[in-house]
Image (cartoon, grey):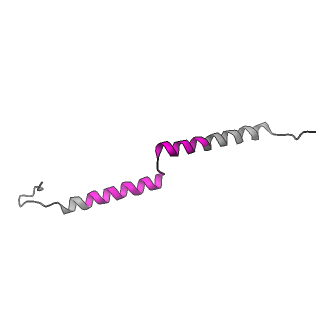
Amino acid sequence: MSDIISLNKVRKAKNKTEKQKKAVENRIIFGTSTKIRKVEIEKAAKESKNLDQRLLKTPDGNKKD
């Protein structure tokens, strides 16, 4: 005699595996995780700020090229 299976559980399990496959594909396509992306953005902003602070200004207040 065969076991009784819940079709609802089978459907949910199938959907879960499909979502996991899609997530893996999206990670490959779209790249880095959110945490890493935020760190990179903060690092770029900090470097930009440091460069702006090091610019020389002329006596009339304009930035020297």
Q: Is 30 a magenta residue?
A: yes
- In this rendering, would 2 be left or right of 60? right
Question: Who's the residue at 90% across and 39% down the image?
Answer: 2
Residue at horizontal 43 percent and vertical 52 percent from the top: 37
How many numbered dots are placed on residues in this image? 0
Query: Which image quarter holds the C terminus?
Result: bottom left
Q: Residue lying furthest right in this view?
A: 1
Q: Nearer the viewer, residue 27 or 6?
A: 27
Which sits in the foreground, 28 or 40?
28
Res 46 quadrant in image: bottom left
Q: Furthest-front residue in view?
A: 28
Displayed quadrant of residue 20: top right
- Lateral position of residue 15 relative to residue 31, left or right: right
Q: Position of residue 47 (x, y in %)?
A: 29, 59
Image location (x, y in percent) of residue 41: 37, 54
Q: What segment carries the magenta color?
A: 21-49
